[in-house]
Amino acid sequence: MKYDAILLTSFGGPEGPAEVMPFLERVTAGRGVPRERLEEVEHHYWEFGGVSPINAQNRELLSAIEEELARQQIDIPIYLGNRNSEPYFADTIRQIHADGHRRVLALVTSAYSSYSGCRQYRENLAKALVDTGLNDSMRIDKIRHYFDHPGFIEPFANGVVTALRTLATEGFSTADIHLFFTTHSIPISMAETSGPPNMRGELAGGAYVSQHMATARCVIESVQRQLDGSLPDWSLVYQSRSGAPQVPWLEPDIGDALVDAKSQGVKAVIVIPIGFVSDHVEVIWDLDEEAKKIADEVGLRIVRVATPGVAREFVSGIVELIQERLQSTDRKALSSLGPWADFCAIGCCPNSRAELPTVAEVPS
């Protein structure tokens, strides 16, 4: 199918202190998050002057993609739209339509299947089309999940290689080190229902957990190719829980895992935030502040690997994902789960509160 515009879709974030609490209230509306938790997170943003790094990071990513598209002589415009802050989806969609574009390919800054990381964006985009009155004149599809695309894997692998070499120069052996792959915790019920309904029996813990495990294995395989000898043990852990305390979420939490690692004789840890594409507040605060504080308290050396951001491999990989849909080029994937489908299945990553219209669903 021919597309004539790209829409970089992201979470959004506040651009000043007065925007922080309204932003958090929009993000958590209807989810039963205690007020005290919102106030706690509000203070995290105040540490950054009330400005989330994510918006500047997305503008930088958009510029990098534009440059790579131009370098490869791919003539297609790219726009930015956010779920929870300006520029909102509806405003961006109006602009895309005003510029004469009708078939849009959305790139979501989440590599995995889940309600909040995929379906909710597809619901938001469908609502924006209705709200703008453009649902009959514009089509929005979505780039597939890229959790095992080489462009997403290689920046993490390169970071692990650098971290291992750094720790080696400090005298740490492989046996001293543990690798923690970390991602955003979500409710267990959301994790278990993530992915296409017909695949849930094949995916332990649902697509969300299975895809993250696949990403971690792909990173390990890439590191192994770059280094001689054995690698440290590794595990998948979670961070940034924000829901109602009585609802079970994915565990173990990174903080608990660090304490346990120390008790098992680990001396140094490398944290790889595979659940994120840029170093925004949840990465910087939850890992560089809170996780590091715990590591320091128990006597662990901790190194955090950077997210892909605007790494050359990641930006090139995004353009490859765009080319897949524009020109039917090869679909790259490094795990047995991929390449993931271009369209989401009916019933994929269901909304537990209401059944709402979506874009980018399997064509009927």
Image (spheres, rainbow, N blue to C red):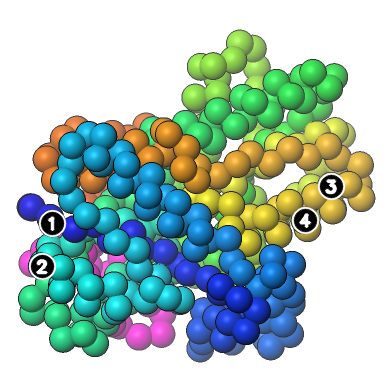
User: Residue 343, how many percent across, how many down?
Assistant: 21, 57
Secondary-structure class at tag 4: helix
Q: Residue at x 86, y 40 (%)?
A: 300
Q: Residues within 10 Å of mark 3 (few under 14, many from 20)?
A: many
CB under 8 Å between discs 3 and 1: no
Amino acid type for the residue under numbered disc 1: Asp
| Nearer to the camera, 111 or 17 | 17
- Closer to the eye: label 2 or 3: 2
CB under 8 Å between discs 1 and 2: yes
Label 2 vs 3, first from the N-terminus: 2
Name the mark on residue 278: none
Name the mark on residue 100: 2
Q: What's drawn in magenta, residue-wise?
A: 343-364
Label 3 vs 1, first from the N-terminus: 1
List the residue tagged with mark 4.
289
Q: Is residue 305 visible?
A: yes
Cα–Cα span, label 4 and label 2: 46 Å
Cα–Cα span, label 4 and label 3: 10 Å
Cα–Cα span, label 2 and label 3: 53 Å
User: Residue 69, how many percent across, how many down?
Assistant: 25, 41
Cα–Cα span, label 1 and label 2: 9 Å
List the residue tagged with mark 1.
4
Amino acid type for the residue under numbered disc 3: Ala
Amino acid type for the residue under numbered disc 2: Gly
For residue 76, side relative to residue 67 (left or right): left
For residue 14, side relative to residue 293 (left or right): left
CB under 8 Å between discs 4 and 2: no
CB under 8 Å between discs 4 and 3: no
